[in-house]
Each structure stands twice: as C-alpha cells, then as structure tokens.
Image (tube, rainbow, N blue to C red):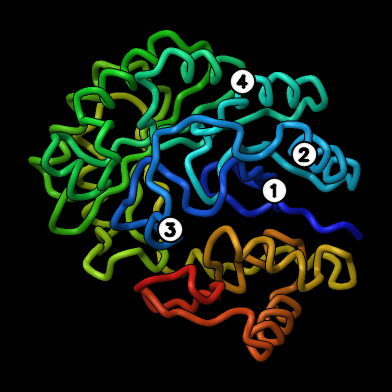
Amino acid sequence: MKRYRYVYGPVPSRRLGRSLGLDLVPYKTCSYDCVYCHLGRTTDKTVERREYVPVADLLEELRRKLAEGKKADYVSLAGSGEPTLHSGMGELIRRIKGMSDIPLAVFTNGSLLWKPEVREALAGADLVLPSLDAGDGELFRYVNRPHEEVTFDRMVEGLEAFTRGYGGQVWVEVLLLGGVTGIRGEVEKIARHLARCRVDRIQLNTVARPPAEGFARPVTQGQLRRLQEIFAGKTEIIAPPAADEDRPPDPGDPDSPASSGDAVMALLERRPATSGDIARGLGMHTMEALKRLEALRAAGRVETVSTGGRTFYAVPGHKRL
C-alpha cells in the first residue's frame, strides 16, 4: 500500500471528534515558536506564503483516504505547521468541498489573518479555529515568539476583521500558562479583545502534552473553571483531566490495516500521543496499540516521554524538553 505523506488519521480530537488531517507545510514551518508547542521548537519561522506541498498531491492522497471509508467528523487542515502559510489553501478548500460532504475545519494560530488574501482563502471553510494566547504585546512575544513581521496589534486586528467578515463558525482557542497568562488580570485582557470579535465559542486550554519549553506549565482545572467566568458568550474548557487521556477506546478491529506500524508512525510524526490516543485514532484495542508502540520503541523509531503523570510516545528528535 502506498504510504501517505500528507494525510493522517482520522485522529481523536477533543474539539472535533474524529479528525482526518492534512499537512500543508513541512514539519515545524510556522510563523510562531510557541513555548508550549507539543511539536517542539520551530525550525523554519516564516511568514512566506507559497505552495509548500502541491495541491494536486494533497487532493490525490485525500481521495485515496476517503475511498477507505473510515468515519471522520471533520476534514482538518492542521498538522505540524501553520496551514495558512500555504498559498494554495483557498483552491484546496474549494476542491475538497467539491469531493466530500464532510465538514471542513482549519486550525490556525491566527497570525496571518491581517492579510486579505488569507481571509479570502478561508472563506470556503465550514469552521475556522484560530487562537489568542495573550492580551498584550509583551506576553504575546513571550508565549508565542512570533516572526518579526507579526506584531500583536496586527494580529488582533486581523482576528477581529476576519471574524466579522466570515460566514462560518469561529471557535477561538485560548491556551493559558500557569503563572504567566493563566491569571485573572491577563485573562481579562484577552477577554476584552475577544469581545470585539464575532466568536461562536471560546475554548480554554492549557499544557497537556510535553511542551517545547520545560518552563511552560499547565493551569489546573479549578483555575480554568474560575477563569472561564470572565469571558462573555459560550465558553468551554477543552483541556482534559489527567484521567481523560486514558479512557477506554472502542475495541475496534485489531487486524485492520489501520493497526499497522506505518499508521501509528503517521500519527506520531504529527504529535506525541498516548497509547489511548493511538487506540482511539486508529480504532484498535488499547493492548494492540501498546504492542505496536512497544515494537516501534524497541526498534528505536519512537521514544517515551512522561508529563503530567502520563506516558507519551514521540518520534526521537521531534521533542526538545
């Protein structure tokens, strides 16, 4: 079977259910270098928009994956970098909408929404999920470490302009760090900016996987509940309690092609994952996922990283703790 290079999943998503993902840019090509990123440090910090991956190649892989008939709640443009850096994103969205009736979502850090061409490219998506992790320029530079062309004012003005002109759903993620942005005064600043946007949901998150920097610490569930009250409109907490990551998956079919080592590696190349993540994403039993993961670890293809009392499997070199 021909290996997938750009399409992965469906993977379990706390926000979207089962998400069939497309990688539009090379690994860690991003306009930010966030301290909390579970993919590690950015290796190509850029705001250059170009066709990093041929649109035709992305569509060919997606057609093959859809033909397998696996259930997905969303097709997601996400992956291991900032998807709005892809200059063909608008055409890709139109073509995907023409081949499937599965809703299409775009995960973005929101850094390029001040560009009219990016806002136009996103217009055909059903759901856009931008982020806002800080309420002022100083903490924006500390937490997100943006490219020098992305100023805080430019970023928030772009977010406001996009949300007020876009016809689909907008769910904004606010990822809070313990002792930094996860305190009342800083959250109030973020809430004031979001009050000027048209947002359908505000989703509070915190560090849940091994971060790029060891000093990026999570906010407790209790703190998140208290901070949730600051925001107007529909606000929900998407950060998982510790036990949630290892809830039992559906048994699935351990003999399906999805259970192969290649399928497991395709997920781990995008993000670290627990055995429960792998089991849910590929529809296999937890013990089958553990067997595959331990075989990959014995072969030196993956390593284990512990954080928050949970064990994650990761591709060596992708994590810089």
Give how far apart the Cα atoms at labels 2 and 1 are: 8 Å
Q: Which percent across, then down, holds residue 272? A: 52, 67
Placement of 150 over or under 163, stated as above or below: below
Residue type of the residue flagged with mark 3: Pro
Placement of 58 over or under 143, stated as above or below: above
Tell me the element at label 1. Answer: loop
Identify residue for label 2: 57
Q: Earlier in the sequence, mark 4 or mark 3?
A: 4
Residue type of the residue flagged with mark 1: Tyr
Q: Earlier in the sequence, mark 2 or mark 3?
A: 2
**Circle nearer the viewer, 4 or 3:** 4
Which residue: 44% across, 30% down? 171
Q: Earlier in the sequence, mark 3 or mark 1?
A: 1
Identify residue for label 1: 6
Q: Along the line of sight, which residue is nearer the eye, 187 or 134?
A: 134
Q: Which percent across, then down, holds residue 5? A: 72, 53
Identify residue for label 4: 90
Kindly indicate whether the residue at mark 3 contacts the one at mark 4 (C-beta within 8 angstroms).
Answer: no
Instruction: Report the disc number at residue 240.
Output: 3
Query: Would residue 27 appear left or right of 158 to someone viewing this image?
Result: right
